[in-house]
Amino acid sequence: MAAAAAHRAMVAFGGLAFVVSTLLAIVCFEVTRSTLIRQRERVAERQTYVNARAVDNALTQNPATPSEALADAQTSAQGFALVRVDGTWYSSSVTGDRSDIPTSLVTVIDSSTAGRQRVHLSSGTAVAVGVPLSAAAGGPAYVELVPMAEVANSINRVRQGLILAAAATTIAGVLAGRWASARILRPVRRTADAANLISEGALDRRLESDGDADLEPLVQSFDNLVDGLQLRIEREAAPRPTSATSCARPWPPCCPPCRWPGGG
């Protein structure tokens, strides 16, 4: 019975710790994930605006060399930039071309509005930021693709850390349940042990108070019960005095005279 109660307490504490830690881990992960992605996108926007200005200045000075103008763009590692001049797209990377730019982003740029969109490349997820270099539709435009690999790695580390934290919290909850159940059931075990010894004849067995004010009434009640039981058993076991109902007769006792056969 005590083992079953202890098991239930461990399961309850462990389950509660698992639910709470899992919910907190999910909330923390989503907040951290969205924050990291938002910060990375803002950095990509600022970086693209700076590089677009540098490329635009280079094209103003020498519009016949778009590829050389792209050399002034300080792109991220594994990132690349594209510039459109006279309807032709030029790339700063041999692995990147116009097909990497979503059509919806090009449409936004053609409306003389800067745009941002998350894209999936062969190297991973990236943020594509496009900036029109002129107000004319189909005019010069600059697009930079900033990889999200660093953010993805950070998010994976955060995920692993939260999973480990949730697992550790669950284990701690199970251990806390075991400790709590042992502490709560300790008086029950002591009472059961004392009752077993009393049933075997150890009437002098008593519960010792451990200073717990909540358990003191239980200890006193148990000891009073055993005291009453011991007193009753002792009374029943004591020898009872016999009642004097016979009358006192002199010694030797008086008896009628004996008559011998043939005697007078």
Image (spheres, grey):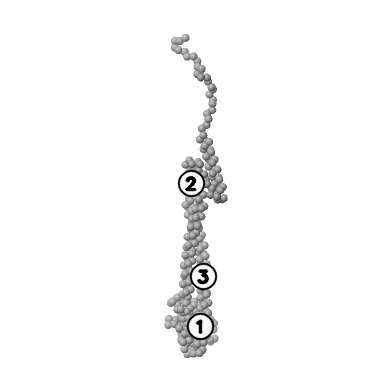
The answer to whether residue 256 of the structure is visible from this angle is yes
Say which residue appears at 54% left-offset and 26% top-offset: 244
Callout 3–callout 1 Cβ contact below 8 Å: no
Q: As displayed, is residue 60 above or below residue 28?
A: below
Where does the image place residue 67, in percent across and percent down from the top left?
46, 86
Q: Give the amino acid type for the residue marked by disc 3 in the picture.
A: Thr
Where does the image place residue 145, in percent across and percent down from the top left?
48, 79
Q: Nearer the viewer, mark 2 or mark 3?
A: 2
| Residue at mark 2 | 193
Q: Earlier in the sequence, mark 2 or mark 3?
A: 3
Q: Around disc 2, counting alpha carbons within 10 Å, would you say few (fewer than 14), some (14 to 19), or many (20 or more)? A: some
| Residue at mark 1 | 51
| Residue at mark 3 | 32
Q: Secondary structure at mark 2?
A: helix
Q: Residue furthest top?
A: 264
Q: Secondary structure at mark 3?
A: helix
